[in-house]
Amino acid sequence: MDSRLEDRSPQERAVGGTPEEQERWGSLVQKVADEQRPHAPWYVRLGTSLAWSAAIAVAASIVATLVLAIRALLSANVQFTLANLSDHCFWAAALLMIAGMVSPPASDLERVRSRNKREQVRSMTAEERRSRAMERRLRRIYDPWRWRIWGGAALAFGLAILFGALSLPVS
């Protein structure tokens, strides 16, 4: 068959290449998912993550309230109002979002603590390095703490909106 007339539809080609490669990547995804996922039902894991997110949001709002209270005590131009508290909670939520983006996953922190890391990297083949890089990316996705911080940021942003809605209109 002429190479120009060859069927190049996506249904014909495998995503990962050969079936062996697909099986290897599938087993890698399953391995990372099993390591990251505790053996609790999904609703327990979801409740735990939501509780952590709420705790993070409340902690960020308390810190924003304390910062505003200190600013109001030390500055003659700043008053402790719900509108100002809304602004401070908004910035606390923004800082949480940034912290969630740059926070390293727990698996990377464990790897940093390992002293034999450089020796292991030198002795690895190219395929093992690709597999380890893919595993590291998957661990970032499955890391629950990043999602909990982002959930806390979303709830802190909701509190900022609530405080802004409850503030008296400025006339």
Image (cartoon, rainbow, N blue to C red):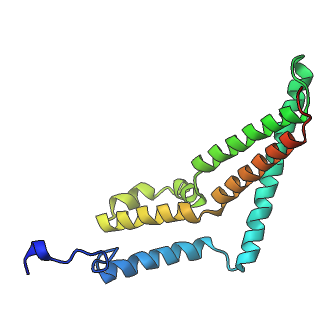
Q: Is residue 4 above or below residue 168?
A: below
Residue 113 position, x and y percent, is: 55, 55
134 or 122, which is in the foreground?
A: 134
> What's the residue at 30%, 75% (across, down)?
10
Q: Decide if residue 28 is on the left or right side of residue 54.
A: left
Name of the residue lying farthest toward the left: 2
Residue 31 position, x and y percent, is: 51, 76
Q: Decide if residue 78 is on the left or right side of residue 113.
A: right
Q: Quadrant of the C terminus?
A: top right
115 or 5, which is in the foreground?
A: 5
Q: Is residue 71 above or below residue 133?
A: above
Q: Quadrant of residue 14?
A: bottom left
> What's the residue at 34%, 74% (across, down)?
15
Residue 1 position, x and y percent, is: 8, 81
104 or 141, which is in the foreground?
A: 141
Q: Decide if residue 89 is on the left or right side of residue 119.
A: right
> What's the residue at 63%, 73% (across, down)?
37
67 or 104, which is in the foreground?
A: 67
Q: Quadrant of residue 94?
A: top right
> What's the residue at 75%, 40% (across, down)?
90
Residue 143 position, x and y percent, is: 60, 62
Name of the residue lying farthest toward the top: 76
Q: How many marks overall?
A: 0
